[in-house]
Amino acid sequence: MRNRDLNKENSIKEKAIKIIVKDGLDGFTINKLAKACNISVGTPYVYYKDKDDLILKLVIEEGKKMETEINEGFDPDSAFDEGMRVQWTNRYHYAIKNPMVLPFFEQINNSHYSHQFIKMFNEKPGTFMSEFKNNLLQFISNAVQRGEIDELPFEIFWSIAFAPLHNLLRFHQQGRNINGLPFVLTDEMVWMTFEKVCKALKK
């Protein structure tokens, strides 16, 4: 059995994400990955059982990284404006630093792998994404109890609270807006949108 090479393994993961974002999951193959990494077709199998194993491990690994960064400095007991600002700051900075990750998760969410992702998102405490989910739910509950926001179904809260930022980040990643014109996201745009979102959610 060949020894594992950390640099080679990281290259495989990085190239895999780029190929999935560019060509979609249907266009992703081990042959294409090996060619992009300039390695033999057998090398990825030193690290992963097969394509599915690689994809699911990427979801888990990238999800844990994202969870850690999104939770950085986030206190579920903080005032609504303060907690939301931390969430937006963390999400914004993470997406800018890791431009391939959000499009990668979009590919996952629109595929047959999505049920695996949802299952991991809802796992018991101490596992993947549970801290993020529990912190956010507690934050929302606290804001409702303090009378800062109305109680809303989680899906509606999420759509108002974070979808605007994710849409701006998607335009930025694509380099064009909904009309196909060039688009570059700025801090001013982010925080202008943030103020509108908080105004929409608060009583």
Image (cartoon, grey):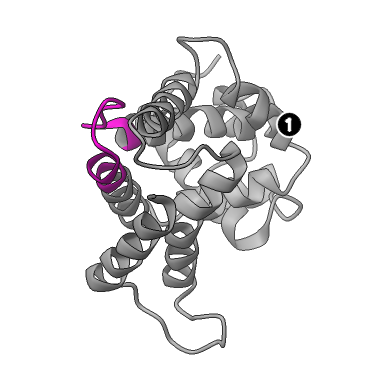
How crowded pointer 1 is (Cα within 10 Å; few <14, some 14-19, many 20+) is rated as: few
Q: Is residue 176 left or right of residue 91?
A: right
Closer to us: 97 or 125:
125
Question: Magenta includes 79?
Answer: yes
| Residue 73 lies in quadrant | top left
Chain part drawn in magenta: 70-86
| Residue 155 lies in quadrant | top right
**Location of the N terminus (image quadrant):** top right
Q: Is residue 112 left or right of residue 170?
A: right
Relative to 28, does residue 188 appear above or below in the rendering? below
Judging from the image, what secondary structure is the residue with disc 1 in?
Answer: helix
The residue located at (67%, 42%) in the rendering is 30
The picture places residue 17, in percent across and down from the top left corner, at: 53, 48
The picture places residue 183, in percent across and down from the top left corner, at: 41, 81
Closer to us: 124 or 62:
124
The picture places residue 187, in percent across and down from the top left corner, at: 23, 68
Q: Does residue 200 appear in this view?
A: yes
Question: Magenta includes 1?
Answer: no
Read off the residue under disc 1.
Answer: 115
The picture places residue 98, in percent across and down from the top left corner, at: 37, 51
Q: Does residue 37 appear in this view?
A: no
The residue located at (41%, 42%) in the rendering is 149
The residue located at (39%, 27%) in the rendering is 145
Q: Is residue 200 left or right of residue 121?
A: left
Say what amino acid the circle numbered 1 marks: His
